[in-house]
Image (tube, rainbow, N blue to C red):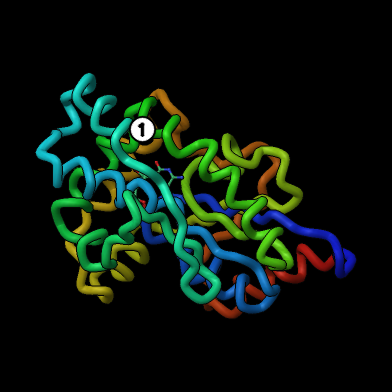
């Protein structure tokens, strides 16, 4: 068990609908951590760029629009949320069919990822300053690129039918297999299981079992 004054960083990577958010939020509650969903960061920038009429194919314009976007943070319960020019988009905008269809194209753009890199790393300092016991950050490249030095790195997976059923239950229109394919095959920070990460198949466990498994792993 980490000592009471040691700040911990947990990274939680995996494809779409593998259970990263529910697991990360549950761990944050259980261990007193700040929670960050970096998928929502990419969704927030996607909303901003689509709102400015910039499609993912217009590389040069994207760089110019990105320069005008100021990143900020709002803490909502245990979750730190990204704001753009002081505004945090509502969840229904972040998860609209259009954003679901476009986000992986924007997330493949190196300049856009670069815009988020230092910001995402700085959230560990924010969590420390706010006296959280640690940080749990979920995404696709957290254990490989953002916090490769983190002591606790996990990679969640589940079969495609289970994941599709989860999205359908949430009432979302989302081509998760296509998104995963784009995320896995892009040049910049592709979706990978970070070297040395603990892999967990969430299809055959309840959420409570997954949280218990991870907590046990950390405490031992
Ligand atoms: O987690 P979520 O499904 O909301 O992520 C939306 C998209 O954001 C992913 O499909 C991926 O393209 C991108 N993403 C990423 N790197 C992260 C988190 C998300 O490229 N760390």
Please tell me which residue lies in front, 138 or 220: 138
Binning the other alpha carbons within 10 Å of mark 1 as few (below 14), some (14 to 19) or many (20 upward) gives: some
- Residue 72 spot, x, y in % from top left: 43, 52
Would residue 73 be found to the left or right of residue 125 on screen? left
Q: Is residue 90 above or below residue 100?
A: below
What residue does disc 1 label? 112
- The residue most toward the right is 3
Q: Residue at x 72, y 53 (%)?
A: 152
- Residue 106 spot, x, y in % from top left: 27, 36
Q: Is residue 62 above or below residue 29?
A: above
Q: Residue at x 57, y 51 (%)?
A: 155
Would residue 54 be found to the left or right of residue 166 on screen? left
- Point out the image quarter for the N terminus: bottom right
Would residue 41 be found to the left or right of residue 66 on screen? right
- Residue 8 spot, x, y in % from top left: 75, 58
Please tell me which residue lies in front, 47 or 204: 47
- The residue most toward the left is 53
Q: Quadrant of residue 158?
A: bottom left
Would residue 190 be found to the left or right of residue 173 on screen? right
Please tell me which residue lies in front, 167 or 33: 33
- Point out the image quarter for the C terminus: bottom right
**Count of labels in the image:** 1
Q: In terms of secondary structure, where does tag 1 sit?
A: helix
Whether residue 165 is visible here, answered yes or no, is yes
Please tell me which residue lies in front, 170 or 150: 150
Q: Residue at x 49, y 55 (%)?
A: 157
Q: Residue at x 32, y 31 (%)?
A: 67
- Residue 177 spot, x, y in % from top left: 29, 48
Whether residue 203 is visible here, answered yes or no, is no
């Amino acid at each position: 068990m980490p000592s009471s004054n040691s700040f911990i960083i947990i990274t939680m990577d995996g494809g779409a609908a593998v259970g990263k958010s529910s697991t990360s939020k549950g761990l944050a509650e259980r261990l007193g951590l700040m929670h960050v969903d970096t998928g929502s960061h990419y969704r927030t920038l996607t909303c901003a760029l689509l709102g400015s009429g910039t499609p993912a194919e217009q590389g040069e314009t994207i760089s110019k629009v990105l320069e005008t976007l100021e990143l900020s943070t709002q803490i909502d319960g245990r979750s730190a949320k990204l704001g753009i020019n002081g505004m945090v988009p509502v969840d229904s905008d972040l998860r609209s069919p259009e954003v679901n269809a476009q986000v992986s194209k924007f997330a493949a753009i190196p300049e856009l990822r670069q815009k988020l890199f230092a910001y995402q790393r700085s959230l560990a300092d924010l969590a420390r300053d706010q006296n959280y016991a640690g940080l749990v950050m979920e995404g696709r490249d957290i254990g490989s690129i953002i916090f490769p030095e983190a002591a606790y790195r996990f990679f969640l997976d589940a079969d495609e039918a289970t994941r599709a059923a989860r999205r359908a239950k949430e009432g979302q229109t989302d081509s998760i297999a296509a998104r995963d394919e784009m995320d896995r095959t892009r040049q910049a920070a592709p979706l990978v299981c970070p070297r040395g990460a603990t892999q967990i198949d969430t299809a055959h466990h309840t959420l409570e079992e997954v949280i218990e498994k991870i907590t046990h792993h950390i405490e031992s």
